[in-house]
Image (spheres, helix red, strand yellow):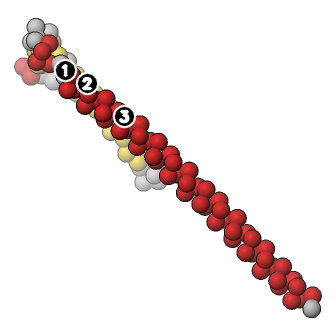
Amino acid sequence: MRFGSTLFLVFIASDQLGRPTASFHLFTAPEDSVIYLAAELNPDLVTPGVVGFFATFFIAGMTVLLVFDLVRRIRRSRYREEVGLLLDAEVAAAAQAEEERKAAN
């Protein structure tokens, strides 16, 4: 079985103004460098097995838990910022009321 002789490369960068640009390049490998795969592979040698399944399951589970933790932390920081803004507004309103009370006397 023949395994591809064409390679696509995509370069993504930004120009001097910071706008994203992309360039596409197509390369063809010479015929003598083409890779041929084995006709028959032993499935016991190329499958991850039970250990691979549990490792993948563990990584997926940890990723989900990390996403939940990240969302919780972002929510907490957003609430802290909102409370801080409310407290700042109350302090500013109290200071303005104090200035108006002093100006009235």
Residue 59 percent across, percent down from the top left = 31, 35
Question: Would residue 80 be found to the left or right of residue 11 on screen?
Answer: right
* Residue 23 at least partly seen: no
Residue 68 lies, with reference to residue 17, above or below; the image says: above
Secondary-structure class at tag 2? helix
Would you name the residue on which mark 2 appears? 53
- Residue type at mark 1 is Gly
In primary-sequence order, the first of circles 1 and 3 is 1
- Callout 3, which amino acid? Gly
* Quadrant including the C terminus: bottom right
Tell me the element at label 3: helix
Q: Residue 41 appears in which quarter of the rendering?
A: top left
- Compared to 87, does 51 lie above or below? above
Contact between marks 1 and 2 (CB within 8 A): the answer is: yes
Q: Residues within 10 Å of mark 3 (few under 14, many from 20)?
A: few
Residue type (three-letter) at the residue carrying disc 2: Phe
Residue 49's tag is 1
Return the x and y of residue 101 as percentages of the image width and height.
88, 85
The N terminus: image quadrant? top left
Q: SS class of the residue under badge 1?
A: helix
**Residue assigned mark 3:** 61
Q: Disc number at residue 96?
A: none
Q: Is residue 104 above or below residue 83?
A: below
Q: Residue furthest left?
A: 32
Task: State the image quarter where residue 85 is shown.
Answer: bottom right
Residue name at image x 89 percent, y 89 percent: 103
- Could you tell me how far apart the alpha carbons at marks 1 and 3 are, in whole angstroms? 18 Å
